[in-house]
Image (spheres, grey):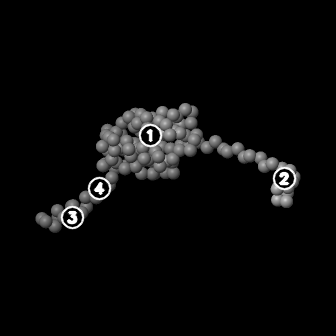
Amino acid sequence: FFFCSFFLFSAIMPAKKKQQKKKTQLKFNVDCTHPVEDGIMDVANFEQFLHERIKVGGKTNNFGHDLSIERQKNKITVVSDIPFSKRYLKYLTKKYLKKNNLRDWLRVVSSAQNTYELRYFQINNEDEDEEGEDES
């Protein structure tokens, strides 16, 4: 009975139209202004690192037309037509900093919804100054 009613029901009901997904373009920025102005980091080198390390479909150097990396002065922009994680970009940025021994001085901070910024660690010297004043 159920089998027959299913076919009757499907014959009476019109087929649903498939909705087309919108092509969403993801755009992420990494702002390297502070370390580049101080001369401790090279943006071109960082861009090359991202080109070599970003994986698409589990393979490196597999960008095609889906992913592109652009450099404007001290900013790197990653534009993707496929799903791409902002967290993955942070992971690769931290990996680059570690490779170049910059991880001890710089950190990757999200400054906007689609932007990371490289900032220096804030080291508080207030405690050391107060100890020096007590001794004298």
The number of discs equals 4
Residue neighbourhood size for the residue with mark 1, other residues' Cα within 10 Å, grouped as few (<14), some (14–19), many (≥20): some
Query: Dot 3 lies on which element?
Result: helix
Q: Most extreme residue toward the left, as rendered?
A: 136
Mark 3 in CB contact with mark 1 (< 8 angstroms): no
Q: Amino acid at mark 2?
A: Phe
C-alpha separation, residue under disc 4 versus residue under disc 1: 25 Å
Residue wearing tag 4: 123
Where, by quadrant of the figure, is residue 76 drawn? top left
Mark found first going from the N terminus, 4 or 3: 4
Residue neighbourhood size for the residue with mark 4, other residues' Cα within 10 Å, grouped as few (<14), some (14–19), many (≥20): few
Q: Report the mark closest to the observer, 4 or 3.
A: 4
C-alpha separation, residue under disc 4 versus residue under disc 3: 15 Å
Query: Dot 1 lies on which element?
Result: strand
Which disc, if any, is residue 7?
2
C-alpha separation, residue under disc 4 versus residue under disc 2: 72 Å
Mark 3 in CB contact with mark 2 (< 8 angstroms): no
Q: Residue at position x 37%, y 42% from top?
A: 96
Query: Dot 2 lies on which element?
Result: helix
